[in-house]
């Protein structure tokens, strides 16, 4: 009957190449056990602690190379330090091999190691058997860090222990800056400022990276530091375009970021949302669109595309004194944001029945419907009305009144639809098209003579389009005289 091999859960059969590499690493620390220990400064507490550990490591090495007699193994000196015990247990793998390896899983990843000895922590075994690895080598020192509150830094080829006071290496600082592709001397106005107190260095993670990054940039500065209080040597400050308006910060969010629980983007978004809420609740009025600040004049200029829109915005802001915070430069967003405080009251004053037609997202539609006629009438109410005008002058008067209320599209459509054999009418039409710079696709409809007369009138008609009410009659009279209908016009 064929034998079946059983394997404990969480273990694996080690490949020959993997066993060979492990044995090679163990022989390396057999020859030089000091490779397991960080560099220290002589005369310090950390130097004293690790000198005792080294003595125990050397004792373990001696017992391995020269096994004691039976009585000596019982009554002789033995390693007492946990690291030395794990070292002694790991050295036995050189002789026995490692046909079966355990698998330890951590948030950082998986690591293989060989179980040896009784009551020896797996962290010590992992750190010793993987001493060349920057991540796993630190596992051998976690209890020293916890017990003595040491600061240990894992560099490319060595570890450094600076005792109970942090002394962050410049080498690690440059490495972290390179990892996140940020220059130490960048002068970004907005972003996350990371300062290392012991090194005296500061770097700013720009706002652009913060808004897009799904990782935690600060964690790169802690990546190769082993400390009981990882953040003790660092200060974090963050500044957005709104920080001059809102000085406070959500401390719980910064705390979670410092612990590595949230990403750059989550920190940045949370801070912006917090600041926007503070701005909305502040006594001063601010105009925020997306993540930009505008003056009242800039906001009104960009959000209004017509005289009607200008009137809506101006009237709403005459009632609404709080801050405006919207996601994009959209008039509909603005009217929805201000509906309950101002827009609804405006509609109610003009036509109370229209308020009931509000569906939750049609405020701009209601306001434009009501303001359309009111604004148009107000914009042309001061301009004179005439008893009777000839066909060319009537066309000109109608088109100019449409242009006065920003109805350029309707004015062009009116010109497109004219049906007339009157050369003067067509010359007036061509002249208006010249003023509106809309001749390119319509030139074929006009004769050379009609164009010539139209071109000669374009300066006067341009002045009429831009005229004030008090100048309107005189300018129209001059044009009337130019086309042969006399200067006198009868005003109603």
Image (spheres, rainbow, N blue to C red):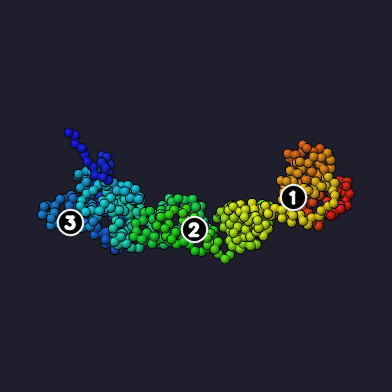
Residue holding disc 3: 78
Closer to the chain start, of discs 1 and 2, is 2
Q: Is residue 242 visible?
A: yes
Q: Is residue 246 left or right of residue 466?
A: left
Kindly state the secondary structure of the residue where label 1 is placed: helix
324 and 192: which is toward the camera: 324
Between circles 2 and 3, the one closer to the viewer is: 2
Q: From this viewpoint, which residue is outermost toward the bottom?
A: 283
Between circles 3 and 1, the one closer to the viewer is: 1
Residue holding disc 2: 271
Q: Residue at x 32, y 54 (%)?
A: 159
Q: Position of residue 45 (x, y in %)?
A: 29, 63
Q: Is residue 425 above or below residue 223?
A: above
Quote the CA–CA distance across marks 2 and 3. Answer: 57 Å
Q: Residue at x 26, y 45 (%)?
A: 9
Closer to the chain start, of discs 3 and 1, is 3
Kindly state the secondary structure of the residue where label 3 is placed: loop
Q: From this viewpoint, which residue is outermost toward the left?
A: 71
Please tell me how many numbered marks the rendered image carries: 3
Q: Report the quarter where the C terminus lies.
A: bottom right
């Amino acid at each position: 009957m064929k034998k079946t091999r059983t394997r404990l859960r969480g273990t694996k059969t080690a490949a020959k190449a993997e066993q060979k590499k492990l044995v090679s690493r163990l022989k390396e620390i057999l020859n030089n056990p000091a490779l397991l220990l960080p560099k220290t400064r002589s005369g310090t507490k950390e130097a004293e602690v690790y000198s005792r550990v080294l003595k125990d490591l050397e004792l373990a090495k001696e017992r391995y190379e020269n096994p004691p007699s039976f009585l000596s193994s019982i009554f002789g000196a033995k390693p007492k330090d946990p690291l030395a015990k794990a070292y002694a247990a790991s050295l036995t793998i050189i002789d026995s091999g490692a046909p079966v390896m355990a698998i330890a899983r951590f948030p950082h990843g998986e690591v293989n190691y060989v179980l040896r000895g009784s009551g020896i922590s797996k962290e010590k075994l992992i750190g010793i058997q993987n001493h060349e690895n920057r991540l796993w080598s630190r596992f051998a020192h976690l209890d020293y860090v916890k017990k003595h509150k040491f600061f240990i830094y894992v560099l490319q080829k060595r570890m450094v222990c600076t005792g109970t006071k942090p002394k962050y290496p410049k080498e690690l600082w440059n490495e972290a800056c390179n990892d996140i592709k940020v220059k130490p001397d960048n002068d970004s106005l907005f972003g996350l400022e990371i300062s290392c107190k012991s090194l005296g260095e500061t770097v700013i993670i720009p706002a652009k990276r913060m808004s897009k990054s799904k990782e935690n940039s600060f964690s790169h500065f802690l990546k190769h530091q082993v400390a009981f209080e990882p953040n003790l040597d660092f200060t974090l400050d963050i500044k957005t375009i709104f920080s001059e308006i809102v000085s406070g910060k959500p401390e719980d969010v910064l705390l979670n970021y410092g612990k590595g629980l949230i990403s750059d983007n989550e920190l940045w978004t949370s801070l912006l949302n917090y600041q926007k809420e503070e701005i909305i609740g502040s006594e001063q009025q601010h105009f925020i669109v997306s993540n930009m600040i505008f003056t009242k004049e800039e906001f009104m200029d960009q959000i209004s595309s017509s005289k009607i829109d200008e009137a809506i915005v101006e009237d709403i802001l005459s009632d609404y004194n709080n801050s405006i915070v919207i996601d994009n430069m959209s008039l509909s967003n603005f009217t929805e944001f201000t509906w309950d405080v101002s827009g609804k009251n405006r509609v109610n004053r003009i036509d109370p029945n229209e308020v009931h037609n509000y569906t939750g997202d049609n405020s701009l539609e209601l306001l434009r419907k009501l303001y359309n006629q009111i604004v148009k009438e107000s914009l042309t109410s001061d301009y004179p009305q005439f008893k009777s005008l000839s066909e060319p002058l009537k066309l000109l008067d109608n088109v100019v009144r449409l242009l006065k209320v920003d109805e350029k599209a309707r004015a062009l459509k009116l010109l497109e639809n004219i049906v007339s054999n009157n050369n003067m009418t067509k010359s007036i039409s061509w002249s208006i098209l010249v003023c509106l710079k809309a001749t390119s696709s319509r030139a074929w409809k006009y004769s050379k003579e009609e164009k010539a007369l139209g071109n000669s009138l374009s300066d006067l008609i341009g002045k009429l389009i831009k005229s004030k009410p008090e100048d309107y009659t005189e300018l129209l009279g001059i044009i009337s005289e130019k086309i042969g209908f006399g200067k006198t016009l009868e005003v109603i």
